[in-house]
Amino acid sequence: MKYPHGKSGASMSVRALWIVSHEKGESGKVRFSRRYPTVELRAKCLAGAQYVAVPEDCVIPQLLLTELGLVEPDKPYMAIRDDCARLQRSPAVELRLGGPGGKTLWPLLTISQGGLILACLPLIEAPPEPRPHLSSLASVSQGLALLSGLQGFLCGTVGKPPEPDVLASRLATLPSVLLQVCPLGTPLDTLPQAGALPATMAPGPGGAQKQPAWKTGVHRGRAVVNVALTEMVRSTQYGNSSKQDMWDVYGTVVCKCEVEGVLPNVTVTLTLPPNGSPLQDILVHPCVTSLDSSILTASSVDENDGSAFSGPYKFPFSPPLEPFRLCSYTSQVPVPPILGSYQLKAEENQLKLHVILQLHESVRNSFEYCKAHLPFFNRSLMGSVDVKVNSGQLEVSKEKNLLVWILGQKFPKSREATLEGAVHFSGHVAGPTDPLCTDLTAYIKLYFRVPDLTLSGCCVDQHSVQVYSSAKPRIVTTRELVSSEYYIWNSTGDAPVSSGLMIL
Amino acid sequence: MATRNSWDQRISAFLLSPSQFLSCTTPDSFLSELLDELRDDKPNDYKKILLLKLLLEYPTVLCATTSVGEGTAQELMSVLSLTPQKSVNLKCHLLLAITNILICTSCLDSQAKAAEDYTNFLFSIIQDTNDNAGGPSLHLLRVTACDCLREMEFCHPGLLSQKLETLYYLKQQETTALHQSYCMLYTRGLKNAIHLLTLQNDVDNAKLRGVLGGNEGFAWKSAELPLCTLPFSSMSHIPQLPTALDCKELKSILSLLLEESYLMTPTLQAAVLRELVEVVAMIPAVPPVIFKSQLLRLFGTMEVELMHAALLMKGTFTDSLFTTEDENFLLKRLVSMAQHPLLGEPDKQFYMDCVLHFPENRPISSSGEEGLPVLVTPRLTLSLLPTVFKDSTTMLCQMHLLSLVHLEADGGDEDRGLTYLFNHLMALLKIVENNGSKEMVVTTFRVSFIFLTHFHHMERFSEKLVDSFRQLYLRHGRLAPHLINLVDRIQECLAESLWPVQLLRALQKSIVEMPLLQLTLQDLSWHLKVLGRAAQESQIGQRSTVVFILNILINSNLCERRSWQVGNSILAVCRHLLQHPTLSQMFTEMADLLQHMSRNYEDTDIQDHARFYYTLTTNLCWAKLAGVLAKGPEGRQTKVRSWSAILADSEGLTNCLNVHQTDGCVLQLSETHEHIPRCEETVTETLKTPHEKGLFELYQEQLKTSGCAVQLTLRYSLTHAKGTDPRFDRIFTICLHFDTNTSHYEDVSDIHVPCLFRDRKPPVVELSLKLRQPFPTSLRLSAIFTTEDGLSWHTQMPDVDVSFPEIFLPVPLPLGTSRECKEEVFDHIWKSTSSGEPSSSATSLFCFKTGSDALADLIKGNFEDYLVAETWDQSVWKVFTFLPPLCHVLLMIVQAEDACQIHIATDNWELLPHIGSYLQNITALSKNPASS
């Protein structure tokens, strides 16, 4: 290339892409790699004398695992791996290639999942020295989106790598997927989910209306709109006046719309009860056509001033064919659905337990399931368990030092469930360990799901879903409340801080 | 199936390391094999795509020059034209490979004919909008063609600058999802065209109209104009069009592009927005407000690339697009994204970086220092305070950001945030104390480092931290290297900080006060490490250390345990103590310690060293002693290094003990073109009386007994490879290691060469090969050697090829055997092989055309050593070669009227292909001597 100034126009490209697998105690292996030589050529022009070439695949795993601290797991300390001053500005790491002058390659973006490491090297348009900020490099967010797409493609939404044969077949289809998604290093789209092949484009509708690129065809047949609202509730309760209990919810609205037309209009409206606290940090899918600025104003970063906009929240959009996350939000709800109290008392070789779980009156007493886990760490294995509950059943897993209290579908009429008794730890066999839960630091973790309920009161009224099309669609709306990270800490122990907001 | 497998293996070997793969073959020959395979009908599409991957990803490795690149591209284009319609995937991969080759081998820049043809071809593909002619099956091909053209425009900016109207028309025509590809192509072309315009002096309305209405060919010459990056954090250097231009048409084009961006995938939306930001930045007549309608959509998005696009707009246009309110809003949005429960950790970490470097409207300070934006306050970032439940990388990001936030906060109420950070660190230390995982340990020390670099001057924290680390160390001696590393790093970046010395002093105090009974051998080795580090600090008194060690030696069985390692660790501490400025104050104790060791430590090596130190201590003044023991500077001679490093496990020693890998090839073997047949000596005297028994029978008997001993000796000179790294100018004790990789050869033993200097005559290396089967091969070769600075190196060398003619030896008859006798043996073997004896025998005929002079030259040049007979009229020659261990190749060369015939006889039919290609080779050379 002839660039007298050695620079080309800015771009959003990646130089190379790797998928590396590593098993504990083994060296890593490149499972897939893809290089983009034209992008590399541009990188060379842009960086001039500071250009650092991408090393060959055979050395990539070792370099990568060293930076991620995964190399030589049996050695307690390695200077090259554990140096305290080596602060990688995640999500980008720097690979030290060694050799004369100590060349480094930056910024390598990585995502790890289970034994898989996905990495890509975006092209940076700025001179490599002084090192630019990640946020000033357009290709970094493109690289992140590419990686998370790749993660979704390989692993689905399960959160762990698939079985080896499934993984192998997904890796085998990757070249043809990348042909459509990132043929020459500049991403065109994100990858499809969980090993699916990118849909082949249906022929154009023939009209003047342009087909959205994120919609692979046109639905024909009966119109159905499905809107599912799921709210997750998080809580940390201490039962201690010196520590403030915390709880909040976050919700997502997932839609599946089977509606005719190239670019049909659908509007979904979320409403809150009259005194409901506003939905915060709303994020919307790119298919939403327009947004009212008031919808976005409430933020969890602000303190609520009561005057904030509290609905209705209208989301006009033109749906893609597949199910998609229309929007998500967080919310500060006034009360936790279940208020707990957990008290432990240590006596010789045994722990005395006293637990009260109180279901709030505003919550419908009808669960799909509700259970509480009471794990015990850093003790010998359980001996006799002498515990009584006023509701539900108790399961004891002695080898895991775990009590599981299954509360079932309903709390008792009083809305108060209690557990009381003692657990003996007398054996010589050591149970599970945990560096956090020592002495009387212990927790109960709750798992529950309540259908047809949201804590914020947020709902999608079936009649508020508007579809502008000829045929009258069938509209289905659902909602549910699910627990997520719901902890009740022993109030007689020393519980860790769970949020900086506690110092407010 | 066999070839299939071997291709799979070769492809994966190539991908793993092209340089290593090509060291066994040449790029040219591998390339021609690849192309042959691609031209072949048999392999299926999947396999061809695999093969193309190599050309696609490593075009410059396989095509070293522009001409090879052009030739390869032309080959692939002919493959493309023969590929059936239905093989769309393969066709697309071919397009990509051709594009990469043309761009990377500079065919595009030099406007090679292939590049021109190919670009026109791509353009003809994309002109079929809405799949009118080709049908939907070619859809993917069009997407690929668009992207190929876009990449060409990227690498050859301005190529499309005279085609804007055509591209605009195509973009408007297309209604399938592919419109986004056309849109990107047009936008990129437009941006570069405008950029080229800004570099011209007299731009008027007509010129601008001319560019937008461009309908001509490709602008091959345009890239000679300078193009530079648009920096988007400051507007100062962006070239701009004159303000007075009439940009109405341009504005409506941009508005339409923005409006239609909604129909693109988020990925391309972000890209197109980014391009348009740069276009607008170059046109003063179009105000940035044109983006206003898009902002709200971007602010609300859950896609990281779109949010980032909004932030980049902010950075480029600041207050000309963003009001103060917008700015506040965007920042708050970023903070809430940085902790949003529905986003992945990498995205959150990225948003934290966005907050840290948020481009504010207020004039940006010119210092370029990493200053925190003023809008980022402790209150705003409360929700980003770290907790122990976060994963390590997120926690470190949060710690970094929050430390900066609280460093700039001015006490008072905000102090609670700082206390929170400190308590967080304490909580981490507690987890480490309770046997947290290795990852947790590393994270905790990194958090400590971040905290200390910001707040080391605040006594209430630093003192507590010293105490916490001291207690932690008492419970977990294994943390010694982490603590020493922390001390080292803090000292490096905060030279004036007292904290490292405070910590070391506290650790020293705790160690020396430990009751002897509590000490384990494992703990002791950690303690000695810490004491050794403390002994390097002149501000820390060392008497207690000496007393402590002496006490252990006297009151435990350590001396009797004979542990060299512990003894060595003690000596390492002593070495630092001997250099300590307060040595005179503890002189007696020190002398006692060394003397005790030299007498009682039951390891001779340790005793010797202790005695040596003792002698030094008692005979030299401190200044001299420190001088002797001081570490030699890096890069000095080997002796200095090992002298001072012998007892301290310094970096230098590790360096010395490691074998380093060279970057490229440092050494090579090159042929000297002479080989010494050794076979004569192996044949015994009995053959001197040929006629008693048949000469042939004797010869055969002889071979049976001694033939296997015949060795092939090849001579090479060992030289430096191309590089000029001065470190390797003089290298020593070179050990060459060969890998035969084949069962046809016996293993080759290592060859040792004392030294190699760049400015001296290269040493000659004799490679002795024992063959099991007489086939050509190539030997993998590596070397280990030492450089002047005492470091050891390992390097991979180019493979050594043993070609077929190199295996030829004269028949192992005694030196004085007459030609007649040789001919007799020749005829014997000829007769028996012709009649199929032994059963592995074979005969063949090779014909070629040549003049009689050329034939004589050919024979003289190639067979002189092996000639056993020739007729007087030079029409028949007999060539008799022996191939170790037991084979013969017999050639009868007959000059006939119209052609020359070579009759071949051999007792090993497997040699025929090698003989054939060898003969082809030499006859081709003789026909066309100019090319040899």
Image: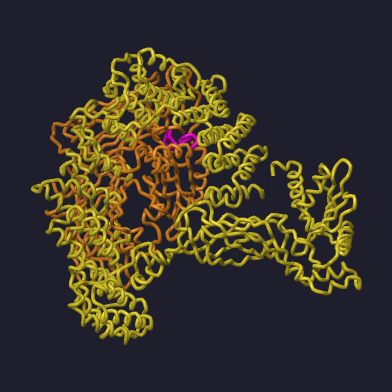
Chain colours: A orange, B yellow
- From what the image shows, is residue B797 above or below residue A293? below
Of all residues, the one furthest to the bottom in this rendering is: B599
Residue at the spot x=17%, y=38% of the render?
B375
Q: Which residues are magenta?
A: A178-191
> Left or right: where does residue B376 sit relative to residue B243?
left
Where in the figure is residue B814, as x and y percent of width and height? 81, 68
Of all residues, the one furthest to the top in this rendering is: B206
- Nearest the viewer among A485 and B251 is B251
Judge whether residue B710 is colored magenta: no
Quadrant in which residue A432 is drawn: bottom left
Residue at the spot x=83%, y=54% of the render?
B891
Quadrant in which residue A144 is drawn: top left
- From what the image shows, is residue B650 above or below residue A415? below
> Left or right: where does residue B470 sit relative to residue B113?
left
The tally of labels here is 0
The reply to whether residue B135 is in sight is yes
Where in the figure is residue B751, as x and y percent of width and height? 58, 66
Q: Main secondary structure of the magenta part?
A: loop
